[in-house]
Image (cartoon, rainbow, N blue to C red):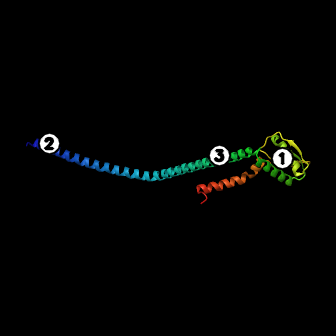
């Protein structure tokens, strides 16, 4: 090999070694940069993720609370609707009493209760369909009552008025309205027993 070839080979070998050295340094620097980037990413993840997890948890809790509230609203609405159906059924049964022997007995009882509450009653106001029955039962009680028909139809029962303007409404509607709070309590307890919510 000529001195020139030796020189070229030597330069070439030196260049290869320098290149390998530079590549090794570059790889080490790249790995160091990559390690720092990973560390920074981990730090950012630790910094960012917990708040996001907390946000996600809070959002999940908000959604669950919203769903519970909506479910409660639906259940309450359903219970209210069922109670209204029950009350409507009671009204329907009360309306069906008119013209039966049971109605006559119920009207007599309501009239006597009304007179006990307002013994000074002078007017007995009734649904037009009850005029004949009211006249008969008023005579039966011995009270001096002027029987008048009302412009409003009722499910049945008397409205008594005294000369000084006091009024006792003892109609089926009035009795049902007065009983409604107790019916609501009974209904709520009954539902709790059926659904097991009371335990």
The residue most toward the left is: 1
Give the SS element for disc 2: helix
- N-term mark: 3 or 2: 2
- The part of the image, by quadrant, that contains residue 149 is top right
User: Residues under labels 2 and 1: Cα distance?
Assistant: 130 Å
User: Residues under labels 3 and 1: Cα distance?
Assistant: 30 Å
Residue for point 18% across, 46% down: 14
Q: Do labels 3 and 2 touch, CB within 8 Å? A: no
Residue for point 48% across, 52% down: 53
Residue on which the image places disc 2: 8
- N-term mark: 2 or 1: 2
Q: Residue 115 location, x and y as percent?
A: 86, 52
Side of 35 relative to 58 (left or right): left
Q: Residues within 10 Å of mark 2 (few under 14, many from 20)?
A: few
Q: Which of the two marks, 3 or 2, is nearer to us in this view?
A: 3
Residue on which the image places disc 1: 159
Side of 187 relative to 129 (left or right): left
Give the SS element for disc 1: strand
- N-term mark: 3 or 1: 3
Front residue (pair 145, 164): 145
Give the SS element for disc 3: helix
Q: Which quadrant of the rendered structure holds the C terminus?
A: bottom right
Q: Residue 123 location, x and y as percent?
A: 89, 46
Residue for point 25% across, 49% down: 24
User: Residues under labels 3 and 2: Cα distance?
Assistant: 101 Å
Q: Which quadrant of the rendered structure holds the N terminus?
A: top left
Q: Residue 103 location, x and y as percent?
A: 77, 47
Q: Residue 2 location, x and y as percent?
A: 8, 42
Residue on which the image places disc 3: 81
Q: Which of the two marks, 3 or 1, is nearer to us in this view?
A: 1
Q: Do labels 3 and 1 touch, CB within 8 Å? A: no
Q: Residues within 10 Å of mark 1 (few under 14, many from 20)?
A: many
């Amino acid at each position: 090999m000529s001195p020139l070839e030796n020189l070229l080979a030597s330069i070439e070998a030196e260049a290869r070694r320098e290149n390998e050295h530079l590549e090794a340094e570059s790889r080490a620097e790249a790995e160091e940069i990559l390690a720092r980037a990973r560390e920074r990413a981990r730090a950012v993840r630790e910094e960012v993720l917990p708040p996001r997890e907390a946000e996600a948890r809070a959002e999940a809790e908000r959604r669950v609370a919203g769903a519970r509230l909506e479910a409660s609203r639906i259940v309450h609405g359903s219970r209210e609707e069922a109670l209204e159906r029950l009350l409507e059924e009671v009204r329907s049964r009360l309306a069906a009493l008119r013209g039966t022997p049971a109605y006559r007995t119920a009207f007599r009882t309501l009239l006597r209760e009304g007179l006990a509450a307002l013994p000074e009653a002078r007017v007995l106001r009734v649904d037009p369909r009850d005029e004949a029955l009211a006249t008969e039962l008023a005579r039966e009680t011995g009270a001096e009552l002027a029987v008048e028909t009302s412009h409003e139809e009722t499910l049945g029962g008397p409205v008594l008025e005294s000369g000084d303007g006091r009024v006792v409404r003892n109609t089926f509607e009035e009795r049902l309205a007065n009983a409604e709070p107790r019916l609501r309590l009974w209904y709520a307890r009954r539902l709790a027993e059926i659904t097991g919510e009371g335990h």
